Amino acid sequence: MIPSLLFDNHGSALMIFSLVTLPFMWRTNKDLWHVTKKFLLCLPLWTVYIILVTARAEATYALRPDVQFGFFFFVFVIFLTSLGFWIKKFPRAALILPILCFALFTWIFSGKRTLCPSTFNHVPESICVEVSQHLIDQIIDADLAGLEEVKITVPKGDDVDNYPFPLYMGKNISRTLHAHGMISRRLEVKILPDATLNERFNLP
């Protein structure tokens, strides 16, 4: 996602627009510059924090979409602050600039990289389907057998909570399968990481 925003499909236009605006903001609107400066300082601090957390956890942590949202927050705030600066400076542009902004975002997020399938560690989609079916089949079989509780095997994940197959996902899977009519009732699902499944499905 971050490469899509910065480099692919002309996403760098966001950054260029903001960087061009900042000198004008610094010279003509000190109050707005003072606020924007805080976000500019927070972005590298956030980056350092993520690097430290990733070093403590694992390298793939930084690739999680929920982690990357922090980066988007700072970039979008700086961009929208720059947009607001020009709208205030040229009130007649109050209509056209938001339209151009919308067109720019549409342009950025409509390319091959942005809309391509996104899987953990770039695992092929077919493998993801096989793994998902393996999990679902175990729960369906337990439901057909009349069990109230089932232990299902999942591939081995990280050493914290077995992400991307977290130990706490059993309740959510059971609720979802029941909501879609795939099982007759909600079961107590316990997660058992199994490293042999990584070999079977050729997972890292």
Image (cartoon, helix red, strand yellow):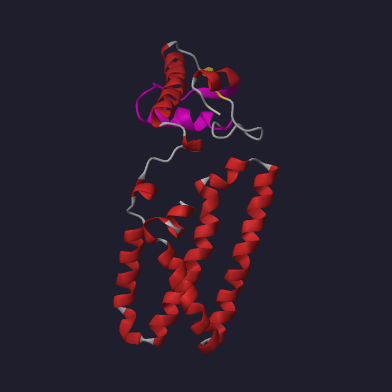
Say if 59 sits above or below 43 in the image: above
Residue 153 seen = no
Viewer-nearest residue: 44 or 182: 44
Q: Position of residue 29 (x, y in %)?
A: 52, 86
Toward the top, the furthest residue is: 145
Residue sitting at x 57%, y 77%: 35
Please say whether residue 26 is one of the residues in the magenta stretch.
no
Say if 200 sits above or below 173 in the image: above
Residue sitting at x 31%, y 85%: 92
Q: Position of residue 172 (x, y in %)?
A: 49, 33
Horizontal arrangement in the rendering, residue 63 relative to residue 182 (left or right): right
Say if 10 sits above or below 158 in the image: below
Please say whether residue 173 is one of the residues in the magenta stretch.
yes
Q: Position of residue 59 (x, y in %)?
A: 61, 42
Residue sitting at x 52%, y 49%: 66
Q: Quadrant of the C terminus?
A: top right
Q: How many marks?
A: 0
Residue sitting at x 62%, y 59%: 46
Residue 64 seen = yes
Viewer-nearest residue: 81 or 189: 81
Viewer-nearest residue: 192 or 69: 69
Q: Position of residue 87 (x, y in %)?
A: 38, 81
In the image, the segment drawn in magenta is 166-194
Q: Quadrant of residue 16?
A: bottom left
